Amino acid sequence: MEDGEFNINLTIVGLGLMGGSYAMALKEKNKGHIWGVDLDNNTLKNAAEMDIIDEGYSIENAYIPLKKSDIVIIAIYPEALVQFVKNNVNNFKKGAIITDVLGIKEDNISYIQSILGDSAEFLGGHPMAGKEVSGFSNASKNIFNNANYILTPTVKNKKDTIEFMKKFIRSIGCTSITEVTPEKHDEIIAFTSQLPHVIAVSLMNTKSADDIKHFVGGSFRDATRVAMINPDLWCQLFMRNKKNIIDSIEEFQKSLNQIKGFIKEENVNDIKQFLKDAASKKEGTV
Amino acid sequence: MEDGEFNINLTIVGLGLMGGSYAMALKEKNKGHIWGVDLDNNTLKNAAEMDIIDEGYSIENAYIPLKKSDIVIIAIYPEALVQFVKNNVNNFKKGAIITDVLGIKEDNISYIQSILGDSAEFLGGHPMAGKEVSGFSNASKNIFNNANYILTPTVKNKKDTIEFMKKFIRSIGCTSITEVTPEKHDEIIAFTSQLPHVIAVSLMNTKSADDIKHFVGGSFRDATRVAMINPDLWCQLFMRNKKNIIDSIEEFQKSLNQIKGFIKEENVNDIKQFLKDAASKKEGTV
């Protein structure tokens, strides 16, 4: 096999934006089977017809592909993830690697690893990729290209598993893979992902959209791109990372109050320094 | 001449991102002369070599093209704009239309119109187009494509002038042209443009960029795109629209505090409603 190719039997649970994109990206790299599990029969049918999965299964029949899968990628909401693992704890293949794609880790991972015991290995994963739209119809194999990917190993994860997952993730196009603890992940992601979502929806809810339609340019459009949010998913993410999100909002509020103060006082020097600092930090980040 | 073509002698003052883009976009549409005025000789030389201006002039020699120009597009910083008009008040061709591209209007326009008297007509304009980078080297004729454009006529502007400017603006690619008073412009733009910039720089200044490099995805990247800000220009914009910007920040702070409160209280219903409202407003805006 060429570098970046695999021969693995795997199951993707949840063929939404992330799961569907994963299936599309993997289909080209993997010589083994790819099975899909979803609540929606039409999605399973479409995915099979597009030949990005070999066969689709309902949640009730998930045990059929799970028993044969070396890798299981679970791409469903936080509450559903925990429930799915609980319901299928005896259906995973001995030694299988299970991963997820969620933006919160700590809560879920400690619980999931405790119920799995030694039967299968759960390694948390978070592709920093996405779109402002959701669902299988918006999936694309390209969303992983050059994206950051975070792995959140714990003491329960084997070194080999982590190394294998890194190769696996690189094969779908991610270039920067970082390892942090689930705790640290949740703390940083509250700032780099959940806070921009909170800001986008707050900005959108400040004024009537009708009044501003013809007055928006790129800055407003970009700041609110993710306001096209999936309410159920993000409500769960907010609830499960509550403390970190509140902390991030409050840190941001301090920074916002600082520049507001400078503007109020017409403190030109401090405004310029604030803008210069932001510009140079931005240059170092993206 | 074809529809959307012109035969006008015009001067563009300031060949930065906006002025340079204007020259590029107009060169294809205008059969008359296009002259450029800039502080930087190299920019004038480059623009002439690229054949997007016929000839370049220093600020001191601006009177030479101004005396022959039916349209003058001034694309420089707020303070410089007022100074330029003041210094050249006797150099404009009788009946010339003068316009600008700035994100603040009220202060400048009342002053400029008062010093111009009846010799030339100033009609404020604001293309809602731009980039996070500045300068002639980043100019592009495409930045106006499908952009919103705002005109801010006052009682001093003739109906014919407004109609002419609309045709002129449509010819460079803008599709939605809206007329509002300078006062209303400044109030709305504080929200749709200056606030997203304030948010982007505040977000950037919240945490060390080094700590988050490998943890950013699209939402953070987009929310901070405009943090690559031009400190001098934006400091002037903030100072000249201070009251509206403070009001916009405070309205946004209320909205942000609202969702923070819902998250703190784990008020799932209100969080979901807040997200749903934001998503449907966003859908109606872009």
Image (cartoon, coloured by chain):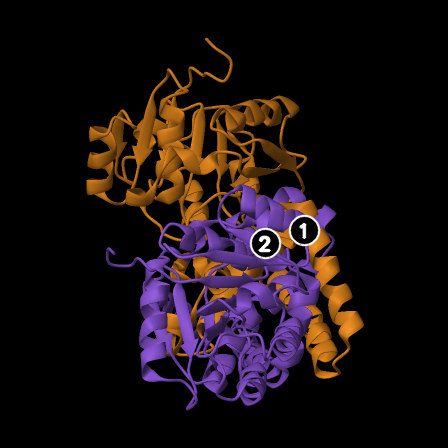
Chain colours: A orange, B purple
Q: Name the residue under label 2.
A: B56
Q: Which picture quadrant has residue A9? A: top left
- Estimate how packed mark 2 is, as few (under 14), some (14 to 19) or many (20 or more) residues with alpha carbons within 10 Å: many
Nearest to N terminus: mark 2 or mark 1: 1
Give B67 or A160, whichever is nearer the viewer: B67
Q: What element carries label 2?
A: strand
Q: Is residue A59 left or right of residue A130?
A: left
CB atoms at circles 2 and 1 under 8 Å apart?
yes
* Residue A88 point in image, percent of width and height: 39, 37
Indicate the quadrant containing the C terminus of chain A: top left, top right, bottom left or bottom right: top right
Q: Position of residue B123 (x, y in %)?
A: 45, 78
| Residue at the (44%, 54%) spot, across then down | B143
Image-based side of A236 in relation to A15, left or right: right
| Total residue callouts | 2
The residue identified by callout 1 is B41
Disc 1 chain ID: B
Which residue is nearer to you in this view: A54 or A65?
Answer: A54
